[in-house]
């Protein structure tokens, strides 16, 4: 996509930014006291066993799955 002025002899640009089949979007969750990734996984995915997805989506902010703190905002990937 052109961003800084015209280019000689360029009449159109196909930005190819149209999405025909959008992927599900991530959600955001603010950690509260008493939370752990398994509990958050159960709330969003219906099973606590998907906590590694949340952990991986939030690296390098999270260094260990057991170290989350109230106030942190986590990205919850689509299931």
Image (cartoon, helix red, strand yellow):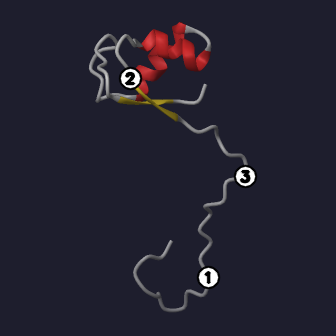
Looking at the picture, tell me which residue is in the foreground, 4 or 69.
Answer: 69
Q: CA distance from mark 3 to mark 2?
A: 34 Å
The label shown at residue 20 is: 3
Q: Earlier in the sequence, mark 3 or mark 1?
A: 1
Q: Secondary structure at mark 1?
A: loop
Residue most extreme to the right: 20
Q: Residue at x 31, y 22 (%)?
A: 70
- Left or right of residue 40, residue 79 in this image: right
Q: Secondary structure at mark 3?
A: loop
Q: Which residue is mark 1?
A: 12
Q: Quadrant of residue 78?
A: top right
Q: Quadrant of residue 9?
A: bottom right
Name the spot of residue 20 as percent of width and height, x first.
73, 52
Quick check: 19 above or below 75?
Answer: below
Q: Which residue is mark 2?
A: 31
- Left or right of residue 40, residue 55 in this image: left
Q: CA distance from mark 2 to mark 1?
A: 47 Å
């Amino acid at each position: 996509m052109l961003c800084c002025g015209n280019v000689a002899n360029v009449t159109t640009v196909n930005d190819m930014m149209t999405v025909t089949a959008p992927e599900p979007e991530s959600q955001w969750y603010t950690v509260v006291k008493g939370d752990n990734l398994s509990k958050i996984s159960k709330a969003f995915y219906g099973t606590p066993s998907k906590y590694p997805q949340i952990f991986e989506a939030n690296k390098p902010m999270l260094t260990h799955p057991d170290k989350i703190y109230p106030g942190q905002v986590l990205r919850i990937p689509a299931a």
